[in-house]
Image: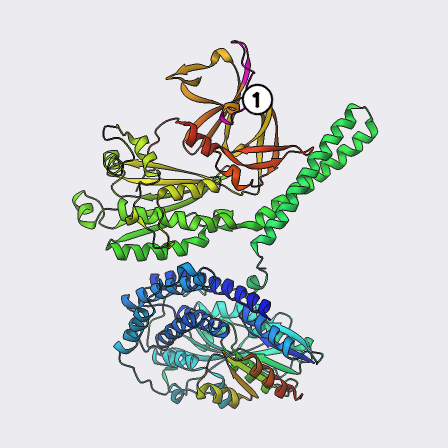
Amino acid sequence: MAREDDRAREEFTSEAEELLDTLSRDLVDFESQGTNVRPELVNKIFREVHSLKGLAGMLGFTEISELSHSLEDMLDRLRMGRIAISKDLVDLLYDSVDSLNRLVIAINDSSVSGLVDMTGLTRRIHQIITSQPQQKHGDAFAELTLDEQTRKSLTEYEEHRLLENVRAGKHILSLEVTFDFSDFDERLRTLTSNLSEAGEVISTLPAIPTGNVNGIAFRLLYGSTLDSAAVAVLAPEAAVSSLRKSGAADSQPAVPPPPAEVEEEMSLRSLSQTVRVDISKLDHVMNIVGELIIEKTQLEALTRAIAMQQARMASHELGKISRNLDRKLNELQKSVIEIRMVPVGQIYSKLSRTVRKVARELNKEIELVLRGEDTELDKMMVEELTDPLMHIIRNALDHGIEPAEERKTSGKNPVGRVTLTAYQQGNSVVLDVTDDGRGIDPEKIRRVAAERGLIGGKEVVDQARAYELLFTPGFSTAAAVSEISGRGVGLDVVKKNIQELKGSIDVLSHIGEGSTFRISLPITLAIIQALIVDAGGDKFAIPLTSVEESLRIYSRDIRTVERKEVFTLRDFTLPLLRLADAFGLDDDHDHGPDTKWFVVVTRAGEKSIGLLVNALVRQQEVVIKSIGERLKTIPGIAGATEIGESEIVLVVDVGSLIDHFGGRAREVRAAVVLN
Amino acid sequence: MKILVVEDSSSMRAYLTTIIEGGTESYDLEIVEAASGFEALKTLPHHKFDAILTDINMPDINGLELVSFLKNHPVYRNIPIMVISTESTEEDRRRAAALGAEEYLVKPFQAGDLVEKLRRLLKVA
């Protein structure tokens, strides 16, 4: 039973997270519709909170259940027209959803609990509920001819909607349709969505058909500005009749037709076609694919060996099998990666909630622009990305965007703008967080860094050095403790987190115009293309996403500038690093100016470094496996991989090599254009 | 015996199924699940149900509309129905009873209560 409870808890948590996600998105819609929110949307939000309450109550999560209960109570009044939409109400909804989110997270992570002000929220809900007098409604049925059975089947809410439509002088119509059992749901959905464009489907009551034994009949109660003749054209399959008693307002709608409402796509079909899978199961499948790739590599090696022994027929056959296997494996790998992919937009709703909240705390008006929400990224990465992104956005609001007064003085729009843009670039996904604030002033950075003892008082800090200091441990102080993650983190931690995802982070900034923090990530971590190189007699794998190009050079091409080896690559002075030296290997290779080398030009973010190696072996797919804690401290190693014939090589982490040995930015790029 | 569980929340459905399966091990019981009123209507012609358990608050048609339909249907009117809902007022119970639902269970409930009411519904000891 205990295991069943665990499973129930897990299922609940993931469903609650999904519900809250939908809820947040609906809230954004809700807010954007002002004070005239579509009743369907209010009801949808009510239903979502109601479901959450039911789930939480069932599993004994008292706080979640109590908060959603109070919220449901308020939303019920809202959908029944007993309270009005106000700014306070919208704020309260956002805060409540935020708190519910925390409570759900706290189920599995107790460090988050205690951050929810239950008493405060309950008090605010109570205030809203009691602040407005309850209106007494008349009897909707007096003006309608509606049979007893139909009346009984209506919920209180449906009664209310019926009344509202009567009061608005709409035509109240009954539509009877009979559909076949096999496809009634699709046909009914199409009908409902057509009808919703010109009115409100108040209730859908199933009924027994008179003729068709295989069918099912429905009676729709419909409020619309269109009269029965017009609706009969809109829904030719239905028998339409008016429910208004004769002489009532039916023929004379009192209100002008509202703009066409578009029914929100709430396809049940797409819901049932989705399978929820634990990401660890996908990891497992991915591992199997990885192992298959290793097997394939061995098969290829064997094929080559046989070919050398001139067993032509056998080698031909093996070659064919190997190629087919290769094709199928690629396909399999591609589909598994696709399954793992989710749109970055999934975290956008969380981010917009945070921005609202932080903006309110800081008393700044902020416009958040979200772009590229369809850009896809590995599910695991999206999860890991939430905290760093929130941190950067919070920084932008806090330090980037100036107070409204200051903005006005410098001729800017008093409303600050933060733009989050996601897009794909080759094998990477780039996320830009851009603000139109004051930009990063190297002089200010220098002062802070000196105060905190990170640099000497006399050190000259240029722009590049300033950006570097931002990411230095100790630069951010406790003042920057992120309430969102519940932990105190600075930009150094953000950078570390992103590097763990094999990504990089850069800053582009113009004083007075704003800053862009650019995060660049590989699309997936599991399997990557790598360049296998030989350095000092050992092989290494360099992720191809970090490789810009490879060149052959001679020892005489290597120059020394300020005791560091460099190479001139078309006008650009590229710092060099002997890969063998980086890992403390013996390198007895270099003898005289005619010694041949290969330079692998690598890049992480904006910085480049040339890795000096003895030979390029080949390009191949590798599956990165993590190596033990002990080697984690050695800079420049991302993990290990097997490259066939049971040969294990280290995978180079270009980002941390550059951090440790120093790279060089090719040019100072202009900050992203702000509009 | 065959019962139909109509509930839009997948985790709640899984939970209900677990309890029912655990509490009725001695009977040969088959559970069919439906995630909405429409889904319930769709499965009806393909099975012969001995009992139906339904939530009220669901998308497309709600649980009460489903009860109303079933209790007026020449073929399905005799299938006993239990409404399982978070709606706990007397008015809600009355409404369900007026439409013909045999049992009413308020969420959150104890596993034992569900099993007992289900047994009563199925008329098994």
Q: Is residue A196 above or below residue A668?
A: below
Can residue A225 be seen by looking at this rendering? Answer: no
**Label 1's element?**
loop
- Residue A178 location in percent, x, y? 59, 77
Between A629 and A147, the one lying in front of the other is A629
Q: Which quadrant is home to the C terminus of chain A? A: top left
Name the subunit of mark 1.
A
Q: Is residue A491 above or below residue A670?
A: below
Q: Is residue A90 above or below residue A242?
A: above
Q: How many marks?
A: 1
Taking the magenta stretch, the answer to whether it contains residue A587 is yes
Taking the magenta stretch, the answer to whether it contains residue B22 is no
Q: Is residue A647 above or below residue B103?
A: above
- Residue A28 location in percent, x, y? 37, 60
Q: Residue at x 52, y 83 (%)?
A: B105
Quadrant location of residue A106?
A: bottom left
- Residue A68 location in percent, x, y? 40, 71
Q: What are the residue bounds of the magenta stretch? A: A582-597
Few, some or many C-alpha atoms within 10 Å of disc 1 (few <14, some 14-19, many ≥20)?
many
Q: Residue at x 35, y 64 (%)?
A: A116
- Residue A646 location in percent, x, y? 68, 34
Q: Residue furthest front?
A: A630
Q: Which quadrant is home to the N terminus of chain A? A: bottom right
Instruction: Check disc 1 and give the amino acid type.
Output: Gly
Q: Residue at x 46, y 31 (%)?
A: A657
Can residue A406 be seen by looking at this rendering? Answer: yes
Residue picked out by circle 1: A536
Task: Tell me the chief SS of the magenta region.
Answer: loop
